[in-house]
Image (tube, rainbow, N blue to C red):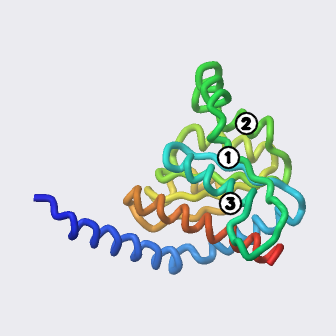
Amino acid sequence: MFERKKFISESLKESSEVKNLILEKCYDSICAAADTLTNAVKDGNKILLCGNGGSAADCQHLATEFMIRLSHDIDRPAIAAIALTTDTSNLTAGGNDIGFENVFSRNIEGLGNKGDILICISTSGNSPNILKAVSKAKDKKMTVIGFLGKNNGGKLKEVCDVSIIIPSENTQRIQEGHITVGHILCEITERELYG
């Protein structure tokens, strides 16, 4: 029989253990991503984000934190950030006309510029449309930060400039790690530049 209290307790314990592992195993990559973001924003570049499913929701969430603000004690200008996951007309036209595997790369072709940042979020690290997005970002001389997880980052680990690989094989814990790291990076960026 399913024991709800035990399940909740084990889930919270596992989540906290993964967060501690992120500090231990991802500290250097988080710092590298923070340096990349602060330098790009300082130079007037923008941040594009892409992902699928829950990762698409994280893109929208993090783009909003950058654009509006995360820390309410800091009065700062907007940080240019666009989630490539939120325009239903664009995504459905792209999926219908040029194939779903091309929707993000097409948007990067149109919106990305040299010096911009692409944050790609993928729990598996193997999503074809994210891999194509990274390839297009490289063509545009953008820097790519990967929020990754399973399979030691999958194929994306090899093509991202900075890979933050959440140390878990559990999709839920990986996604929790992604949003936590995203909040940390946003807050570092706004505090170091405008705090």
Give the residue number, with chain letter if any, for mark 1.
83
Residue 102 appears in view: no
Q: CA distance from mark 3 to mark 2?
A: 21 Å
Check contact, mark 3 vs mark 2: CB within 8 A. Answer: no
Q: Position of residue 93 (x, y in %)?
A: 64, 23
Amino acid type, label 2: Asn
> Can you tell which quarter of the image residue 187 is in?
bottom right
Which residue lies at the image location 67% right of the left edge and 42% below the top edge?
A: 84
Lateral position of residue 153 relative to residue 78, left or right: left
Q: CA distance from mark 1 to mark 3?
A: 11 Å
- Would you call the spot at circle 1 few (<14 residues within 10 Å), some (14-19), or many (20 or more)? many
Question: What element does badge 3 sit on?
Answer: helix
Which residue lies at the image location 67% right of the left edge and 68% below the top edge?
A: 185
Residue 151 appears in view: yes
Check contact, mark 1 vs mark 3: CB within 8 A. Answer: no
Which residue lies at the image location 47% right of the left edge and 51% below the top edge?
A: 124
Of 55 and 63, nearer the camera is: 63
Q: Position of residue 119 (x, y in %)?
A: 66, 54
Amino acid type, label 3: Glu
Amino acid type, label 1: Ala
Of 156 and 41, nearer the camera is: 41
Give the residue number, with chain letter if any, for mark 3.
65
Question: What element does badge 1 sit on?
Answer: strand
Residue 107: assigned label: 2
Q: Position of residue 149 (x, y in %)?
A: 48, 59
